[in-house]
Image: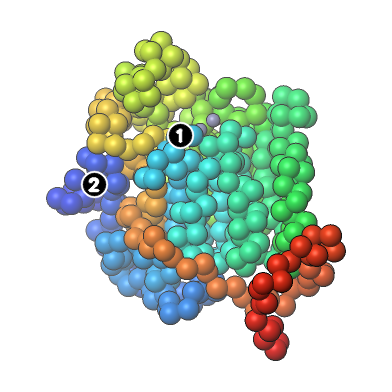
Amino acid sequence: MQSKIRITWTAPFALAVIIGIGISVHLEHRAVAEETASPAAVADAQPRGRTPTPIVDAQYPASYFPNTELLGDQEMRITALGTGMPNQTRAAVSISYLVELGNGDKFLFDIGSGSMANLFSLRPDFSKLDKVFASHLHIDHVGDFMGLHIGGWLSGRYTPIHFYGPSGSTPELGSNAFVDAMQKGYAWDLTTRSGALPDKGAQIVVHEFDYLQENEIVYEDNGVTIRSWPAIHSLDGAVSYSLEWNGLKYVFGGDTYPNRWYAKYAKGADVASHECFLPPKTLAEYFGWDLQQATYVSTRVHTEPQAFGKVMSEVTPRLAVGYHSVQSPENNAAIMDGVRKTYDGPLALARDLMVINVTKDDILVRMATVDDYVLPPDVTEAYKEAPRTDEKHPSEAILSGKWQGYTPPPMPQK
Ligand SMILES: [Zn+2]
Ligand SMILES: [Zn+2]
């Protein structure tokens, strides 16, 4: 059934759009509780002291407090973990999106530098964070994969991690080569932890696919279908993705110049995210570049706001999400000014830790409230019991250097 949607322009909501926090799209008739929450959706290991509760009648709290809300079994939650630039700020780290589904599945789209801290601030069940879909191999999109591999392994993942990513125009520019070389680079780290941590958690499985494929399936399991198509960005080997599940569709654009594949295959998206770069003049001022360099980057390598708006006017998603900028007041105003020249539909300019709840009836955009000193999440019994080989130790030559002036306390009994 096609839902009639109403955009609620409340005062805080209007302010949120102006400063780029987001928007709220609600139905006249709110979803009933049974449609938005079900015990079947609660499969995550929860941190101590947290009991998630169902959302009744789509009455969400104004902020998203991680691990306090039961994701409905028909519901999708998209969290922007990183929305900024390669030159990060505390407010805007590099690109990453977390997609959580009511069937319990979780997917990461890109894992750019700095995004791990925001992921950890959600205290997720890391045993489920075992799939990353990389749009391309720029470090502001994959730079924290190493951190996810190790940090997630320390924090609950006891199975291999899967890296889905495009091929390149030559083998050494593809995802297989990236992961292989990266793993060799931190061989010392992997060797120290192997044995102390669950053995299988060390493994990385790479699923490299042809970057030229058009809307072909790269992942299909448990009712979830993920497809890729080419993007136009810097060199061959950048892609965009769509994720479809339960009649809902999320599109992750990665980085791209406006392209015909996105215009075609993003159609029908409930939430379509696409980069929305700073316009040339603002980009030049922000980075201290000359206008020629800024114009080239903003309008030839990336998508400037007016172009983003044109793409979204073509795609007409239920919600358009722009990202890949630091949303300072000046930058936000310049982006909004450009987008609104060419697109007047539902829009959220993403900031780090912006959360989007999506059902067939509602799309709600909020910010997450997290603690700067958040504890790591708890691990499951399965993690504790997963097989481990023996721990590694330094050599006798190194151990002989232990200072005799200190004696450690006795080891407690197991
Ligand atoms: Zn890029
Ligand atoms: Zn980028």
Pointer 2 and pointer 1: residues touching (CB < 8 Å)?
A: no
Q: Secondary structure at mark 2?
A: helix
What residue type is disc 2 on? Answer: Ala
Classify mark 2: residues with Cα within 10 Å, few (<14), some (14-19) or many (20+): some
Outermost residue on the right side: it is: 396
The image shows residue 254, relative to residue 13, as above or below, that is above
Q: Which residue is mark 2?
A: 16
Can residue 210 be seen in this snapshot?
no
Q: CA distance from mark 2 to mark 1?
A: 25 Å
The chosen color scheme is: rainbow
Between 3 and 90, the one lying in front of the other is 90
Q: Which mark is residue 87?
A: 1
Q: Relative to residue 65, is residue 9 drawn left or right?
A: left
Image coordinates of residue 215 in percent, x first then y, are: 62, 37
Q: Does label 2 or label 1 sit earlier along the sequence? A: 2
Q: Relative to residue 207, is residue 358 drawn left or right?
A: left
The image shows residue 259, relative to residue 381, as above or below, that is above
Q: Nearer the viewer, mark 2 or mark 1?
A: 1
**Identity of the residue drawn at 57% across and 22% down:** 234
Q: Secondary structure at mark 1?
A: loop
Between 354 and 408, the one lying in front of the other is 408
- Image quadrant for the N terminus? bottom left
Between 261 and 233, the one lying in front of the other is 233
Query: How many labels, in total?
Result: 2
- Can you tell me whether the CB of the residue at mark 1 lies under 8 Å from the nearest atom of ligand 2? no
Outermost residue on the left side: it is: 11
